[in-house]
Amino acid sequence: MSFEKSVKHVDEIIGRLSEGDVPLEEAIELYKSGADELAKCKKLLEEAEKAVMTVTSAEEL
């Protein structure tokens, strides 16, 4: 899944949880799913940062 799709999915999860009418078990599953998506986003951002640093370092040579 792309970064943008992951962020959208997290946003949808937050919206669903914010409604307040989610049964506890479903809320827990949504929370887990959101946490997983956030971890993916963090990894994608770290990879993008490394790519930018690599390009920046190569340009300085």
Image (cartoon, rainbow, N blue to C red):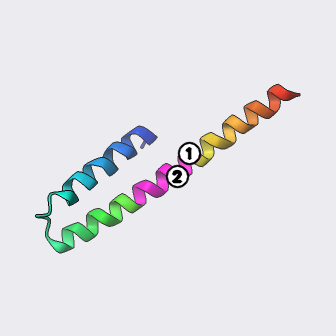
Q: Amino acid at mark 1?
A: Leu
The answer to whether the residue labelled 1 contacts the one labelled 2, judged by CB atoms less than 8 Å apart, is: yes
Report the label total.
2
In the image, taking residue 8 as reference, residue 61 lies left or right, namely right
Which residue is at 80% across, 34% downward? 57
Q: Circle 1 is placed at which residue position?
A: 45
From the viewer's side, name the closer residue of 29 and 20: 20
Rounded to the nearest whole Å, what is the CA distance between mark 1 and mark 2? Answer: 5 Å
Percent across and percent down for residue 40 are 48, 53
Percent across and percent down for residue 21 are 10, 64
From the viewer's side, name the closer residue of 41 and 2: 41
Check residue 41 for magenta coloring. Answer: yes
Q: Secondary structure at mark 2?
A: helix
Q: Amino acid at mark 2?
A: Lys
Which residue is at 27% across, 67% downward? 29
Q: Circle 2 is placed at which residue position?
A: 42
Quarter-wise, where is residue 31 in the image? bottom left
Furthest residue in direction left, as rendered: 21
Percent across and percent down for residue 7 are 38, 45
Quarter-wise, where is residue 50 in the image? top right
Which residue is at 26% across, 48% downward? 12
Q: Secondary structure at mark 1?
A: helix
Which residue is at 41% across, 60% downward? 36
Label 1 environment density (alpha carbons within 10 Å; few <14, some 14–19, many ≥20): few
Q: Is residue 2 visible to the viewer in this orientation of the structure?
A: no
Magenta stretch, main secondary structure, is: helix
The segment highlighted magenta reads 36-45
Label 2 environment density (alpha carbons within 10 Å; few <14, some 14–19, many ≥20): few
Check residue 39 for magenta coloring. Answer: yes
Furthest residue in direction right, as rendered: 61
